[in-house]
Amino acid sequence: MAHQKLRFYQTGAYPFPYTTSGSDTALTVSMHKGEPALAFLTQTPQEDDIVFLQLYRKTPLETGRFSSPPNYRGISGLAYDQSRNLIWATEGLGTPNQHPDRIIGIEADSGEHVDTINVPLLDSHALAFNGMYFVRSDGNVLEMIDRSGNILATLKVPIGANCRGLSAAPWTYIASDTLENKLVIISLFGQVVAECDEPPGEPAGIEAVAFDNIQDFSKIPQFPESTESPEKPWSPVPWNFRHTVYLANQKDQTIYFGYFYQ
């Protein structure tokens, strides 16, 4: 069956919280000290900082930051575990000091490294967590991993050879096929169910994706900081409740946010 074609309705954008010439930018939506936030990280020549930005604003507002754990300076994927208030992180093969055989748990308020899951070696560029298991990507392969580090399934990514961003959404994953400049919705079984071939920003720049699983969008107006009633229907109508997706475009150093519609 042919997959659905989607468009992306942009509701806001702002620059990266710091300028970088690095790569492997990572995003996740998390709680931070009791408030919903966008956790942002990218590799720089110096230490990596995880920066927390208040969600859904016209202009960025930083609410906190901490350095990535010692000896973990090449983080390329972030995901959030709300039940434990942990940010899970993964690294690639970039340098001998990186740990592509681990997924580490970072306490989202303090930045402490509190958990480590040993996993098979993979040059990981993206990570997602849906509350039950992890999915990570090296650009070509998706691996489904349980909380003990066991590989439950391995799938060739059907979206091309460059899955650089990945985020769990209701019953699916949202992925960036960066090389082909597409955003793709993948089912739990690895099938493409929808795609958007017009993401915002400079082409082939989307390095990270974060779906907002935390906020109640029945209580939030369509545009950030709007005076409109939250009860006013969004127009166009968001596709399958994918109300807000954050995208980090490494090429133009901009975080875009908006939603899918048909």
Image (spheres, grey):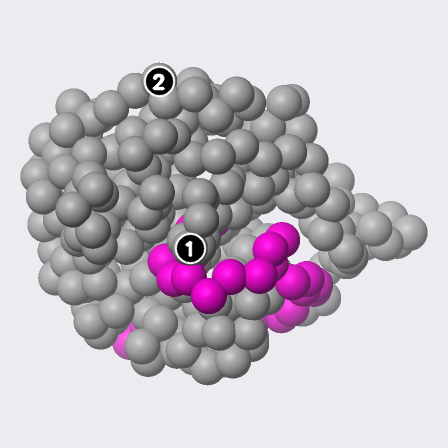
Q: Which residue is mark 1?
A: 45
Tally of numbered discs: 2
**Residue 166's image quarter?**
bottom left
Q: Element under label 1?
A: loop
| Amino acid carrying mark 1 in the image | Pro
Three-letter amino acid code of the residue under disc 2? Val
In percent of width and height, residue 130 lies at 35, 37
Q: Residue furthest front?
A: 46
Image location of residue 105, percent across then percent down? 34, 26
The segment highlighted magenta reads 1-29
Q: Nearer the viewer, residue 100 or 152?
A: 100
Q: Quadrant of the N terminus?
A: bottom left
Q: Residue at point 55% right, 56% down? A: 246
In the rendered structure, does residue 9 fall within the stretch colored magenta? Answer: yes
41 with respect to 100 (left or right): right
Read off the residue under disc 2: 114
x and y percentages locating residue 153 in the rendered image: 10, 44
The quadrant where residue 181 appears: bottom left
